[in-house]
Amino acid sequence: MTTPRQTAVWIGAALAVALGAAWWLRTPSAAGSGSAPGIASDDTDRGVDASASPPTDSARDDPRVRSYEQRQAFEADARRFFANAKSLRPVARSERARTLAAEVDRYEADRGLSAGEALVLRVGLIEATVDDPAERSTRVAALSARYREVARQREAAYESAHDRDPHFRDYKAREAAIVDEVMALPTIPGGLSRDEYLRQRLQDARVAAYR
């Protein structure tokens, strides 16, 4: 399960690639690809085989099939919009963007999109609908700040809830020391990268704390 701390890290990473992903979504090759960046394929999670024949009428009654088809329609709409946004009239472009933003709201609320995925799509909508570079930058910065604040609040609530757990307190006491130690190492044992070694050490500390 992704923790709020991991979500905060992912949001930072997502922001770094958001502008590139938004540009990719607008290119012709994106319109012909299977899924738009920032929109994860749900074929496996929803138990639907994308290579199978079109569903029968009885199969369409299955909530998983309906959900899958709705998600596919959302992805197709998003790809078409990002590919063609600049050719639309301003009013039509704004209306389409509002419709997609409402869908992003819904999927994010239902956890059909992660915070990072939703952030990438929202930045794409800003890029597609705001022509002034300064205003685009301002909106993206405000959006990033909002997501970071939500992630910070969730992390604080998560840690507050676990502070009463002595095992969690023990792990947190070790965590900072391990990070400092690993970052100061001139060479990493076992031929691992520094990140891999750090993850291994932190995992070992979690296991030890809960024994």
Image (tube, rainbow, N blue to C red):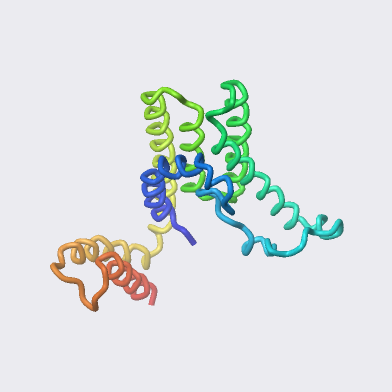
Q: Is residue 90 left or right of residue 163?
A: right
Percent x, y for residue 188?
A: 20, 72
The residue at 39%/45% (across/down) is 152
Q: Is residue 164 left or right of residue 78?
A: left
Residue 97 location, quadrant: top right
**Where is 196 relative to 113, above or below?**
below
In the depicted view, which residue is nearer to us: 136 or 200?
A: 136
Figure quadrant of the C terminus: bottom left
Percent x, y for residue 158?
A: 43, 53
Percent x, y for residue 190?
A: 24, 78
Q: Is residue 14 left or right of residue 98?
A: left
Looking at this view, name the residue that lies furthest to the left: 186
Residue 206 seen from this side: yes
Residue 166 location, quadrant: bottom left
In the depicted view, which residue is nearer to us: 127 or 148?
A: 127
Percent x, y for residue 112?
A: 59, 51
Residue 170 location, quadrant: bottom left
Looking at this view, name the residue that lies furthest to the front: 28
Residue 160 seen from this side: no
The residue at 37%/47% (across/down) is 12
**Where is 138 relative to 208, above or below?**
above
The residue at 29%/64% (across/down) is 195
**Where is 189 relative to 157, above or below?**
below
Q: Is residue 148 left or right of residue 98?
A: left
In the depicted view, which residue is nearer to us: 108 or 97?
A: 97
The mark tally for this picture is 0
